[in-house]
Each structure stands twice: as C-alpha cells, then as structure tokens.
Amino acid sequence: MPVSGAEARNELDRILSDPGFQCAERNKKFLRFVAEEFFAGRADSLKAYTIAVDVFGRPQSFDASIDPIVRIEATRLRAALIRYYEKNGS
C-alpha cells in the first residue's frame, strides 16, 4: 500500500525525535535533507556535492573523488536506520 506524503513526513519526524535512533546529529541532518529533497520532487537531482556542501559544510571546491564524506556518512546512516528498524519494527 502506498504511503502518503503526510505519513512519510510523520515517520521521518518520529524517527528523528526518537531517543532510540542512535546516530550523529549531522546524520540526522543528512536524513532530513535527503527526505525533504525527495518530498519536494528533487530526489533525481541530489548529488554528493550538494549533500557535502549543504549538509556537511564542505567548501564550494568539494570534490567527491578526493573526499568520501558523503559515502562514509551514508553508510553510517543506513546502518543506524537498519538498527533502529530491527529494534523498533517496521
């Protein structure tokens, strides 16, 4: 069954405010940024550069081939979400 935009936003807010969701504040910011871009219909235009600059405060000269911050933090965020859902269910 499809999830409405309101339900998805509520789930995002629930996860981010739950003390059981264990991840760094910057990864909470990462999750919110990516989700908001998705909700706004801009998921296809998300790039490592945008995330690095807008979320992680990297300079405009950011180069993803030199600085793997987005890949590393995405891996950490995925792991945190997996742990959260394994503990709290779907």
Image: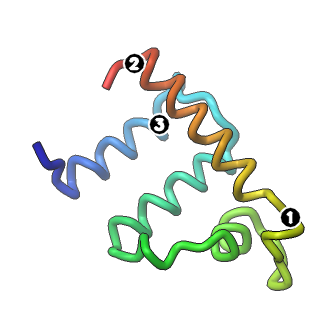
Mark 1 residue crowding within 10 angstroms, few (<14) / some (14–19) / many (20+): few
Kindly identify which residue carries mark 1.
Answer: 67
Query: Relative to residue 61, is residue 86 depicted above or below?
Result: above
Dot in front, 1 or 3: 1
Query: Relative to residue 2, is residue 86 depicted above or below?
Result: above
* 28 left or right, relative to 38: right
Please name the residue shown 43% across and 25% down the image. 85
Please name the residue shown 34% across and 73% down the image. 40
Q: Secondary structure at mark 3?
A: helix
- Residue positioned most to the bottom: 60
- Residue positioned most to the left: 1
Kindly identify which residue carries mark 2.
Answer: 88
Please name the residue shown 66% across and 69% down the image. 48
Please name the residue shown 72% across and 68% down the image. 52
Q: Earlier in the sequence, mark 1 or mark 3?
A: 3
Q: Are marks 1 and 3 in contact (CB under 8 Å)?
A: no
Amino acid type, mark 2: Asn
* 30 left or right, relative to 86: right
Q: Are marks 3 and 2 in contact (CB under 8 Å)?
A: no
